[in-house]
Amino acid sequence: MNWQRLVEDRQKFFWVLQIAGWVGYALVNYIGSRVFEMRDIYVFVIVLNAYAGCLLTIPLRYLYRKIWNAKPLFLIFVVFVASYIVGTSWSVIQKFNLWEIYRHGYRPDEWFYYFKQGLDSVYIVLCWSGLYFGIKYYQLLQGEKQKALKANTMAHEAQLKMLRYQLNPHFLFNTLNAISTLILVEENKNANQMVSKLSEFLRYTLNTDPIKRVPFEQELHVLGLYLDIEKVRFDDRLSIEIDVSEEAKNALVPSMILQPLIENSIKYAIANLESGGAIAIKAQVFANELLLEVSDNGPGTDISEGELVKSSGVGLANTQDRLKTLYEHNYSFVLSNNQPQGLVVNIRIPFEKG
């Protein structure tokens, strides 16, 4: 049986603990009877006492549920009074079982015997009440933790999806403009290729959950579609260099993690160079970490402590936010100047084999 499920099912959990607790009480008393060499008939008395205690404490559960939200002082008062009544009633039953079954009608003369045995029963019922409230509070605390965790997870999912879908409109706008231009100049073959690749690219972005990780080899294929589309736009002005190790291809990465970085390089670097430019994509595994790098030879920008001094785009910021949401502090996202010019983006994330 799954322990977590049992704890969450309050009805079943109560009955399991109730029965197990009173069986345990009977076993402890049985061991004591063996130590003090009581006659075998005493086992029957122990069973009856445990059964009576089990039955008498069941109504306490429903009483405590009724007063659960009462003021603390009233709650404590009711618990002590109810425990005293139930404990005293149980003590009377125990005396009856002991004297009528085991001692055949014998009654002790000392008055303190009655008082002491009655208090013992009250203490046991008070312990039962304390355990009930302790377990109840524990269950409520676990329930609140589960709700908070679920709400936090849903918030992260919503945030990731928002960040992912914020990346697509700019690229889509540029591509549709390029297709429109190709149609106007009657380059229908190129326009048709762009539409086909755009369709496959968008299908991937819409069907892939931004929260799940995918093999980097799959990401490379999608990046290939994206770059093929951009090559139609820029023709020979765009040069691509890819250097990815075989081990890195099998690594799991957040879906579409590099696309906004490449889009950023094309928008701010390649598009501003009359003679075009180059983008390099590198990936390798080192010390159980996946190292990703995207670099260009554009005009570069001002960088301070691994971050842009001024940035009007959302690509870099959204990528960093996604990494922070997915990996918390177990990642790095660093910007640096390329040599002799351009921008380099380095990402380090834990290596997970797909």
Image: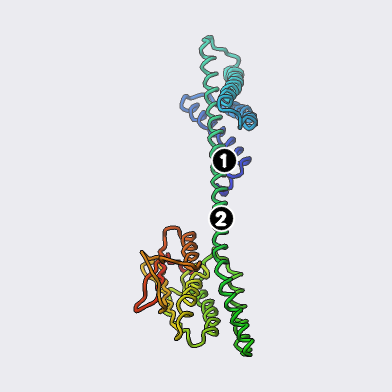
Q: Quadrant of residue 6?
A: top right
Between residue 245 and residue 320, name the one nearer to us.
320
Q: Which residue is mark 2?
A: 155
The dot on residue 140 is 1
Q: Say above or below: 15 vs 320.
A: above
Going by the numbered disc 1, the residue's amino acid type is Leu
- Residue 61 position, x and y percent, is 62, 32
Residue at 58% across, 71% down: 169
Between residue 233 and residue 259, name the one nearer to us.
233
State the scheme by which the image is colored: rainbow
- Residue 4 position, x and y percent, is 55, 47
- Residue 17 position, x and y percent, is 57, 37
Query: Mark 1 or mark 2, which has the lower sequence index?
Result: 1
The dot on residue 305 is none
- Residue 151 position, x and y percent, is 57, 51
Residue at 54% across, 57% down: 156
SS at mark 1 in the image: helix
Q: Quadrant of residue 95?
A: top right
